[in-house]
Amino acid sequence: MFFPKPEVVKRAHIKNYEEVYKYSITHPEEFWADAAKELSWFKPWKQVLHWQYPYARWFVDGETNIVYNCLDRWLKNDRKNQLALLWVGQDLEVKKYTYEQLNREVCQLANALRSLGVKKGDRVTIYLPKIPEQIISMLACAKIGAIHSVVYSGFSFEALKTRIEDAQAKVIITANSYPYKNKIINSLEKTLQAIKDCPSVESVIIVNRISERVKIPEDIFSKINFYQWTELLSKQDTLCSTQIMNANDPLFILYTSGTTGKPKGVVHSHGGYMVGVYLTSKLVFDLKENDILFSTADPGWITGHSYMTYGPLLNGITTLIYESVPDYPHPGRWWEVIEKFRPTIFYTTPTAIRALIRYGEDTPSKYDLSSLRILGSVGEPINPSAWLWFYKNIGRESNLPIMDTWWQTETGMHIITPLPCVPLKPGSCFKPFFGVVADVVDENGQSVGKNKEGYLVLKTPWPAMLLDLWQNPQKYRETYFEKIKKKTKKFLYFTGDSAKIDDDGYFWIIGRNDDVIKVSGHRLGSAEIESALVANQKVAEAAVIGKPHPVKGESIKAFIILKKAIQPSEDLKKELNLNVRMFIGPIASIDEIEFVEKLPKTRSGKIMRRVLKAQELQLPVGDISTLED
Ligand code: PRX
C-alpha cells in the first residue's frame, strides 16, 4: 500500500472516502442533486432519477446546456481572463485561449453552423486532428443543440464513412492536412473519399492546419458546399445565444467497438453527463482554480471528451493539449512539455508509460517535473511494474498519487477510481466512485465473493451513463442489461470486463470478457477486423483474437482460411494488413497472420474465438460441448 502524504489529504476536497461513500450510496439522489446544484440550470429538475428498465434518466425535466456551464457562466467573473485552452503544436508553437477568447470563437462557429441550416438535434461529424478547432467545434455544436460525432483523425475513410452514414451527418468539419511526426497526413483526401456517397452531407468546413489552400474538385461534389474555416468565421458575430436543452437531450454520439462488425454509437446527454464529468474531474483530480490538466488523449476518444474538454472547462481550469506523440522528435518530448508549460495534473495511458520505460530512467530525470501534483492512468489495466516506474520517475520524491481510473465510453465518467486521499495498491483501480455500487458476479448475477474472478457489473445508475445506442435500442438492452440472466428488472449494468475484489475491497481489472481487443488502449472489435479481412477476394474466412503484448497491452493475431487455389505468402500477409488499415486505420494493424485449413466453430457455424485464444496462449479450453469438430 502507498499512503498519501498528509499535505495531499489536507489540500484535497475529499478527506475521508469511506464516510462520503457511505452517505452517497444511502442517499444517491441527494448526493447527485447537491453536485448538480454547483452548476447552472435554466430550469430546475422535477425528479433527480427516473429508472424504467432499461433506461435511467437523470434530472428529469431540468433545462441546461453544458456549454453554458463550460463558457457562458465564467464570462460573468474574472475567470473570463483565465486560460481555458493552452495548445502546444508538434513544433512547440503555442496557441492560448482565455475563457473569453474561446467563447468568442465558439460563438462565431455556432453562428456559422446556424447559417448553414444546422438546427437542434442535427448531427455534425468532426474529423479533425488534435488542434484547438477540434474543441471549438464540439463546443459550438453543443451550444446550438446540434449533436457532435467526433471521429478520431487516425481512422480511415471507410471508418469515417460508416460513422457519417450511421449518424446521417449534415455537416463535416475537417482539416486540409496535418503534421504527424515527420509525415504530413492528408485528411481532406480521406474526407472527400468518405463523403462521395453520403447524401446526408450538405456542407464541409475545412480548417487549414497547414498553410496551403486546397482545391476542391467541385464537379464531383456539386451538391455539397465547401467553406474555409477562417473565411466563414470572419463573417460571423462573436455573440451567439446558447440553446436551452432538456437535461436528457443528446449532447454527442461517440462510436466505439463492440462485438459486432459495426461500431456502436454511444449517446450522452447534456444534463447527467455534465454533472458526472464535472464532479469526477473535480474530486479525482482534486481541481482548484489554477490547475492545468495535461491529458495525452485525443478528443476522438471518450477521455478527450470528458477529461480534456468538458471536465476541465466545467471546473474553470486550463486544459493543456499537446498535438503529437510522446517520443517525437525525441523521447523526452512529453517531459519537455511539462517542464515548459507546468501542468499540475498529468493523465495518460499504461501503453504510453510502458513505451517510455524503454528509453530508460535517464530521459525523464533531465526535466523539471515539479509542477505536477497528481498523475492519472486510463484505458487498460496498468501492470504494477509500470505503475511503480510512473510513481518513481514521474511522481519522484513527492510521491504523487496515481489515479488509476476505470471507466468506459458508455459510462462517460470515472466509475472505479481512487481519490488523492486514499491508500493505493499498484495495479488496482481502488473502489467505486461516490453513488456507484459495483460488484463481481457469475452468469446468474450472484456475487462470486472475495478474490474470485467474475463479471464486473454496476448495480446502481450514475448520471453520466449513456442515454442509448444511436438508432439501436435493442442492442443497448442486449449488450448492457441482458447478458446476465436474472428474474427482476432491477438495475444491473454489464460492463464487458472481468475483475476480482480483494480482501480490502479493492478492485482488480483483468480485462475484457467479450470480443473486444484493447490495442494501446484503443478499443477494437474482432468482428470489425474480420470483416475487413474477408472483404479481400482471396479470403474465405477469418478469425481474430487479442494476445498479451508487453507494451501495447494486447496485439492482434488473425487466423485466415484462404479460398481454394490461393497460395499463402508473405506478400499476401502484407496485402491483408493493408486492407485492415484501409478499412479501420493504422491503429488496427495486425501483428501476426496464420493461414489455417479450419477454424473451431459451433454447430451453428459461429467461430469460437475463445478456443483459438486458449490454444494460442496454452490455457485450458473450457467448455467445448458446442464445438462441431
Ligand atoms: O476494459 C476496460 C478498459 O477499457 C474499456 C473501455 O474502453 P473505452 O470505452 O475505449 O474507454 C477507455 C477510456 C475510458 C473498459 O471496459 N479500461 C479502461 N480504464 C481502465 C481499463 N482497464 C483497466 N484499468 C483501467 N483503469
Image (spheres, helix red, strand yellow):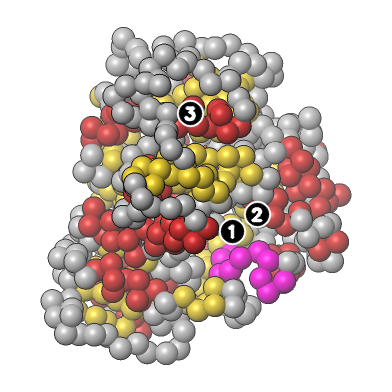
Q: Are marks 1 and 3 in contact (CB under 8 Å)?
A: no
Can residue 592 be seen by looking at this rendering? yes
**Does label 1 or label 3 sit earlier along the sequence?**
1
Q: Which residue occupies 16% across, 85% down?
A: 219
**Tag 2 or tag 3, which sits nearer the N-term?**
2
Q: Can residue 463 be seen in this view?
A: no
Q: What stretch is highlighted in magenta?
A: 320-330
Q: Nearer the viewer, mark 1 or mark 2?
A: 2
Q: What residue type is labelled 1?
A: Thr
What is the three-letter code of the residue carrying label 2?
Ala
Q: Which of marks 1 and 3 is in front?
A: 3
Disc 2: which residue:
352
Query: Which secondary structure lies at badge 3?
Result: helix
Task: Identify the element where label 1 is drawn.
Answer: loop
- Residue 495: % across, % down: 45, 30
Q: Which mark is residue 610?
A: 3
Mark 2 Cα shell of 10 Å, populated few (<14), some (14-19), many (≥20): some
**Vertical placement of 328 versus 507: above or below?**
below
Q: Name the spot of residue 527 as percent of width and height, x first.
A: 37, 42
Residue placed under numbered mark 1 in the picture:
296
Task: Determine the image quadrant of residue 580.
Answer: bottom left
- Between disc 1 and disc 2, whose residue precedes? 1
Is the residue at mark 3 in contact range of ligand 1, meaning its CB lies under 8 Å from it? no
Distance from disc 1 to disc 2, alpha carbons, whole Å, reads 9 Å
Q: Classify the position of the N terminus by image quarter.
A: top right
Q: Does the magenta stretch include residue 485?
A: no
Disc 1 and disc 2 in contact, CB within 8 angstroms: yes
Q: Is residue 616 above or below residue 233?
A: above
